[in-house]
Image (cartoon, rainbow, N blue to C red):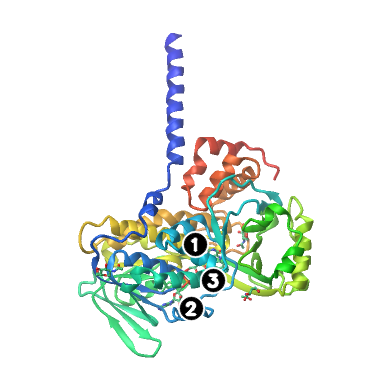
Amino acid sequence: MAFSTFAVGGSALVLLVAGLVWQRTCKSPPPWHAELAVLGQPRAKKLPGTAVVCGGSIAGSVTARILADHFDRVILVDPEVDKIDESKTRILQYNAFHVFLCLFVAGARRLWPNFDAEIQAAGGRFGSTKAGLHYSGIPIIFPPSFPETMTLRRPGVQRVIQKLLMQHPTATNITVILGTVRGFGPSGDTSSIQSVLIRKTDGTQVSLSDVALVVDCTGPIQSGLKWLRSAGFALPENLRRSYSGNMRYTTINFTVTPELEAKLPIPGLSKDTIMIYSNVPHSTFGCFLLGFSKLEENTMQMLFNDSGEGESDMPRVASDVLAYLRRFPSHEPIPPWFFEVIALLCEKGDPVFYQAKSSTQSYVEYHRVPARDLPSNFIAIGDATLQLNPVHGQGFAKIMLNGIALDALLRSLNANSLPRDFSAQYFKKSAAYIGGLWDATRLQDYAYPTCHPMEGETHETGRFIRWFAAKLLAAATQDEEVATAMWKARHFLVADSALFAPTVLWKILWTSSRF
Ligand SMILES: Cc1cc2nc3c(=O)[nH]c(=O)nc-3n(C[C@H](O)[C@H](O)[C@H](O)COP(=O)(O)OP(=O)(O)OC[C@H]3O[C@@H](n4cnc5c(N)ncnc54)[C@H](O)[C@@H]3O)c2cc1C
Ligand SMILES: *[C@@H]1O[C@H](CO)[C@@H](O)[C@H](O)[C@H]1NC(C)=O
Ligand SMILES: *[C@@H]1O[C@H](CO)[C@@H](O)[C@H](O)[C@H]1NC(C)=O
Ligand SMILES: *[C@@H]1O[C@H](CO)[C@@H](O)[C@H](O)[C@H]1NC(C)=O
């Protein structure tokens, strides 16, 4: 008797301790947290040689800035980087509605101490996204205090970042070449890339030799893979995994003068948030999103998405917008003020429509390649490795995660040059940070019949994850602790494991859902 009481007491204690350890492990800061704290600090003794960055959009600019803290010289190659005030013809989503997650803002502030001032000077705003998001019409709780993010149209953000890059003291060691990278030259023993071939916009060719590091920042065309293969690096056939989500996006840009804005019946609370109203549909209703936000002064935008191959029924002209919104199925109706706001904007806000497609999502899984098959000095950042369904607005934050991984790895080097397995180390570290994004978005997309899963997977793949994600959203409409963990994980302020801390997990699993 005494013995069994002791045993029960003992195992309860073991369980309690295990529970506490579990809770603490799940809630411990994500690995990039400490690395972010040192981002942007110049290294005492620079690494010798030239780092070459292929592509000068967001990934290219962030990478060039980071590398200038580590290398003697950085060369950034892009055919359009000088046209700071013109639209980028090579970036299809240039005019699409963009949101920016907290990690991107936190990283940009480290890299450029005057980031906030420049974003504000360009008309951007900082604030929180409180109050805006609804799941099937029902508000998702927003944590009472939450770090800021920002809003500004994508072209504005791109201009600010390019300007900051060229204004920063490290710019003295960054050279911009207007041109396109055409290929790589291998070292004699194919252990590294020795040269980078460039065609300048004036038609001349140059070959940069003795390169210390080469970074692919070419975005969704992921050219690095092609250049490595042509240079004789034997990479597995199926290295680039892809599926066709057939995602389509419509952005409507409204011009909102202060007089017009004063007439919009937006309720007080929604007025000062970055996302005025957004609604994520319940999975049984299909796959579309509705987002509405005030960007810089005078500009509001609304975003829709769907998935499909034929004609889309997303609105293309102002007269279709209200009818489309009325068809939007939801457990709770979209509030009447929202219809009034959009009706006014469609009439008086000079609506301009943009369509963007994201047919294929892909991940070049360099982290699967053994170190001996990769050149020691090649890495890829941004869409050049992983191109996600953009619906969660993770593109810029993902670049920052890659950048933090690169910076941390370079800081950990003792030697004066990159080790033979530098590339492999980078891709492994980076995959640990971004691989979860690929799994979560891809498996979520498999819910749609118009999505074509990647080889070896079916629409059944990921059922459990989809079920869990739905439970999570439902619980986040009712419980603050769950909602806080969800928001923080979405903005990369905590690791995903925060959702599995016992106190959070049981609520996700047991909160009774009305859906
Ligand atoms: C519809 C849509 C909505 C999106 N919404 C969001 C959002 O809300 N939030 C978010 O964070 N992300 C969003 N994204 C994703 C985000 O736009 C991308 O992740 C981001 O642009 C990737 O940046 P990047 O620098 O890797 O590539 P890109 O911006 O595509 O830039 C690639 C650069 O490489 C250059 N280049 C190409 N080939 C060469 C070559 N051979 N030599 C030299 N230069 C070359 C190009 O000129 C270009 O400047 C969205 C994407 C889409 C499609
Ligand atoms: C530029 O590079 C030189 C040589 O490595 C270095 O001494 C100098 O500090 C660098 N300048 C900046 C602003 O980083
Ligand atoms: C969107 O509206 C703003 C405000 O009128 C305007 O400055 C901007 O050029 C518009 N953008 C596009 C891409 O039409
Ligand atoms: C549309 O957006 C919703 C809300 O975020 C999302 O759940 C869904 O996956 C998106 N659909 C497509 C086709 O991208």
The image quarter in which residue 191 lies? bottom left
- Pointer 1 or 2: first along the chain: 2
* Vertical order, 358 against 501 (above or below): below
Of tags 1 and 2, the one toward the viewer is 1
Which amino acid does the dot numbered 3 rest on?
A: Gly
Coordinates of residue 230 in the picture (x, y in percent): 33, 77
Q: Furthest-top residue in view?
A: 1
- In the depicted view, which residue is nearer to us: 316 or 256? 256
Q: Residues within 10 Å of mark 1 (few under 14, many from 20)?
A: some
SS label for mark 3: helix
- Give the residue number, with chain letter if any, for mark 1: 116
Q: CA gap, disc 1 to disc 2? A: 19 Å
| Residue 167 visible in rendering | yes
Q: Furthest-bottom residue in view?
A: 203
Q: Residues within 10 Å of mark 3 (few under 14, many from 20)?
A: some
Coordinates of residue 157 in the picture (x, y in percent): 52, 68
SS label for mark 1: helix
What residue is drawn where x is 20% and y is 75%?
A: 188
In-image side of 411 versus 401 (left or right): left
Give residue 156's mark: 3
In-image side of 317 versus 115 (left or right): right
| Residue 236 visible in rendering | no
In-image side of 473 versus 45 (left or right): right
Q: CA gap, disc 1 to disc 3? A: 13 Å
- Give the residue number, with chain letter if any, for mark 2: 84
